[in-house]
Image (spheres, rainbow, N blue to C red):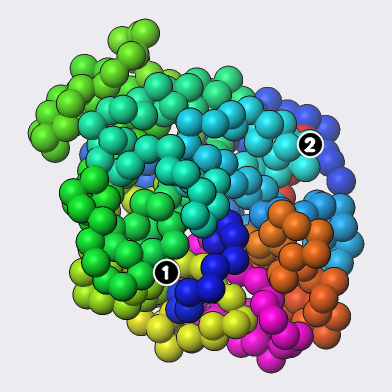
Amino acid sequence: MRLIAPALKPAGAAAPRRLLACALAAIGCFGSAAAGARAQVLLPPGGGVFTGLSGGSYSSFSSQIGKHPAVDGVFVTWGRSFASAFGQARANHARLMLHISTAQGYGAPEQITPLGIARGQGDGYLLSLSQAIAQSGEPVYIRLLPEMNQANNAYCAFNNDGSSRGPSHSPASFRAAWRRSVLILRGGSVAAIDSRLHTLGLPPVRGAQASTLPLSPVSFLWVPQTAGSPDTQANSPGAYYPGDAYVDWVGTDFYSLYPNFSGLQRFYAEYPRKPFVFGEWALWNGDDPGWVTQLFSFIASHPRVHMALYNQGEREDGPFRLSRYPSSRREIKQLIASPRFLAYTPEWQAR
């Protein structure tokens, strides 16, 4: 969620620096058949849970909850500069997560359609991002086109009334756009990527200046709502799933205003082979420490949950700011003190 929308949203200090290669050796990764490149799952060590923050001041949030967030989530828009995101995460001593949308918020102009991405019209952006990740020398999480089954997002296949937005936004176009993005950003031989794209019925990479794209540690997070808005079978999460080979993490967003824990449980159970992430979680419209306790109990009892990013939002007076919820803030501080919740990723622990 980048901006608030009226539609109902279902439940959905530093050690001496070592060589980055040593730090990356501690990062978990699994293999993938996609384009011959390795899928970097980038799991936390020891079955832990990476804490995270999107929006707001890192120092203020750390003092509020008593723990430094390990992952820095930054919302970026397709086709627009992402350079500051890398510097921000580095300044915050955190691993970067890019929340990539095709519009700057609900109702904002769409920069590219899913079909446009699938056909290669956005390859320049993907190639630039690939180079930026490689130049950073650090692992990156990519939360690509999140909440794709939420009609307020430009890349959703359906309008709020259930009507289709046509072939340019169909679930099939979304799946193709996702697969193309993953193949390019995972990198490897351009010829091998082109071969895989051909198998998928997609055109070759446009504008590549080298025969090999960077093999950077990137991990892809597929994060729909647990139920669609509109809540139809055609707009269900599974309609947008691009396949196991193209997804490293599965997850959802979860807010206290919509405490659908039964829906959360059903969704968690549907993808048993993938680590689970809360791409966004936050208090909303009421101080509710009971909800906090229930959410942390869910995390404790579901061992595939390995990351959770609190969404402070970009506005100082926004509805998710913990300053609004003193009782919940105290509960979070107590529960997140558990050693399972990790304050730093391995590459930052090694510095």
Q: Do the residues labelled 1 and 2 touch (CB within 8 Å)?
A: no
Q: Earlier in the sequence, mark 1 or mark 2?
A: 2
Specify the quadrant of the image occupied by residue 232: bottom left
Q: Judge by depth and name the residue closer to the eye, 320 or 248.
A: 320
Disc ID at residue 225: 1
- The stretch of residues the image draws in magenta is 276-304
Task: Identify residue for label 2.
Answer: 91
- Residue 210 in picture, x, y percent from top left: 36, 8
Q: Judge by depth and name the residue closer to the eye, 203 or 114.
A: 114
Amino acid at circle 1: Gln
The C terminus appears in which quarter of the rendering?
A: top right
Q: Can residue 36 be seen in this view?
A: no
Amino acid at circle 2: Ala
The residue located at (49%, 54%) in the rendering is 107
Q: Are there few (<14), some (14-19), or many (20+) residues within 10 Å of tag 1?
A: many
The residue located at (86%, 67%) in the rendering is 64
Position of residue 24 relative to residue 302, above or below, is above
Position of residue 318 relative to residue 269, above or below, is above
- Residue 90 in picture, x, y percent from top left: 73, 35
The N terminus appears in which quarter of the rendering?
A: bottom right
Disc ID at residue 344: none
Would residue 196 appear left or right of 23 to someone viewing this image?
left
- Residue 303 in the magenta stretch? The answer is yes
Secondary structure of the residue carrying tag 1 is: loop
Specify the quadrant of the image occupied by residue 196: top left
Q: How far apart are marks 1 and 2 (CA)?
A: 31 Å
The residue located at (11%, 35%) in the rendering is 201
- Residue 336 in picture, x, y percent from top left: 73, 71
